[in-house]
Amino acid sequence: MKSILKLIRRFFLILILSIVLILFLNLILFFLMFYHQSSSRSPWKAAEMVAGSLLQAEDGTYELQDEGKTVLEQSGAWAILVDADGSVKWSSSNLPSEIPLHYTLAELSWAIRGYIEDYPTTVGEYGDDLLIMGHPKTAYWKAMWNTFDYDMIANLPQTVVIFLLFNLVIVFLIYLFAVSGVLRSVKPIIRGIEALPEGPEVYVKEKGLLSSLAVSLNRTAEKLRMQEYDLKKKETARANWIAGVSHDIRTPLSMVMGYASQLEDNKSLAESERKKAGVIRFQSMRIKNLINDLNLSSKLEYNAQPIQRTEQNAVSLLRKVVVDFLNVDPDNKYSLVWTTDESLTSCLIQADANLLQRAVSNLIVNAQVHNPDGCTISAKVCKEGDMCRITISDDGKGVSDEQLATLRTSSGRSPSKLGEQQHGLGLLIVGQIAAAHDGRIEMDHSPVGGFQVSIILPLSEKRPPSESK
């Protein structure tokens, strides 16, 4: 609706500017068309110039000077000098034969006001005589009875204003009538376009001035509906497949892990056989963790995973995860080093403790999986402005610059788009958990040559109370 009001204001402004521009151009055109009437070459000025160029000799004859002859030649006019008795005392050489040489008072009054034999005339004073200048028949049109009421002349400014206002009102009414028809067609179209981002359930009646646009909009909405339906079908099928695989594989995987654990602990078996059983148990555990990660990632992607945010101390949370991993590393292949500044005892954040522990655990497991020969893993918490940074780094084989660039661009993909991503589903889940907490992850080379991932979350005291859960 705001866009419709903006459109109306725009049209109205264009209307006002158009009217002002038209009036201005009309004034200029009026001035240009009638400018010559006030110039020295106007018919009345020309008659005065001819009268001023006419000289009387001592013998009583008259001679027209060159200036007067030029005026007559340029105007294509003729001239006569009439005395008080109505007789023509002098005439130009080009006087038409039908022009009388004597005039009564009545004829002179007609000549002065209008015409002589259909020639429009203008007059100039020459002493006690009158010089009449006759112009070509099609040169001028003269109003012979141009008398006007005095009150009308006195009220002319108000009359002009009234006429202008009346015309503006008429134009405005015509504009409203025209715009109302357009708006009746535009309003449904705009509403339909505005409703498209909220959902493809849009239909516009295909009638009016913009019926073709309504047809296109309905086709677009129908296409979006079909695309949304197909996408929902695919995503539902994927979610159902993940859930089905997770359910169906749980029992046989538990049996494989159980038997492998028994074989690994059987002292009667050869050492090589027990190691093979240990490999089977370890790889089965990886499969189980992968299935769990796939389920969690799918839930996070569709906001199906409930997030219970409470105030957590990131230092304590990270320390707990580190201790848990130290307790399950009997071979001491992976050294976990606490590099957090001892002066930092509290770093409060609003987080789901289980999910955040899962994210940190994934980073530690990621370092272990990609460094099978062992490495040193560092855990660190620090404050950066109004953010809390949790960093897990290692001194293992790390990644190349190309692999790092790929990881940075693929960390936000859905599980179905991971393809051959080197560090697998673990980093994707870390990124999803960070995003669910209004944070982000950063990946880089470790200062000691391995791989490093940081989870960056807003501090609890910097979050508005309305956002805390």
Image: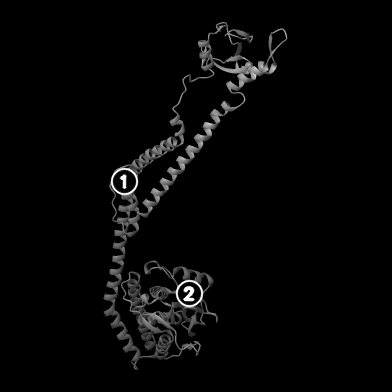
Residue most extreme to the bottom: 267
Q: Position of residue 420 (x, y in %)?
A: 43, 69
Secondary-structure class at tag 1: helix
The residue nearer to you, when weighing 138 against 403, is 138
Depth-wise, is mark 1 or mark 2 nearer the camera?
A: 1
Residue 457 visible in the displayed image:
yes
Q: CA distance from mark 1 to mark 2?
A: 53 Å
Mark sitting on residue 266: none
Q: Position of residue 283 (x, y in %)?
A: 37, 81
> As displayed, is residue 30 above or below residue 52?
below
Q: Amino acid at mark 2?
A: Glu
> As displayed, is residue 304 above or below residue 100?
below
Residue 117 visible in the displayed image:
no
Q: Quadrant of residue 70?
A: top right
Q: Amino acid at mark 1?
A: Arg
Q: Position of residue 180 (x, y in %)?
A: 33, 44
Q: Position of residue 72 (x, y in %)?
A: 63, 16
Residue at 35% from the left image edge and 84% from the top image edge: 281
Q: Local crowd at mark 1 within 10 Å, few (<14), some, or many (≥20)? A: few
Secondary-structure class at tag 2: strand
- From the viewer's perspective, tell me whether residue 384 is left or right of residue 201: right
Q: Quadrant of residue 87?
A: top right
Q: How many marks?
A: 2
> As displayed, is residue 447 above or below residue 65?
below
Residue labelled with disc 1: 184
- From the viewer's perspective, tell me whether residue 407 is left or right of residue 305: right
Quadrant holding the C terminus: bottom left
The mark nearer the N terminus, 1 or 2, is 1
Residue labelled with disc 2: 442
The residue nearer to you, when weighing 247 against 317, is 317
Q: Local crowd at mark 2 within 10 Å, few (<14), some, or many (≥20)? A: some
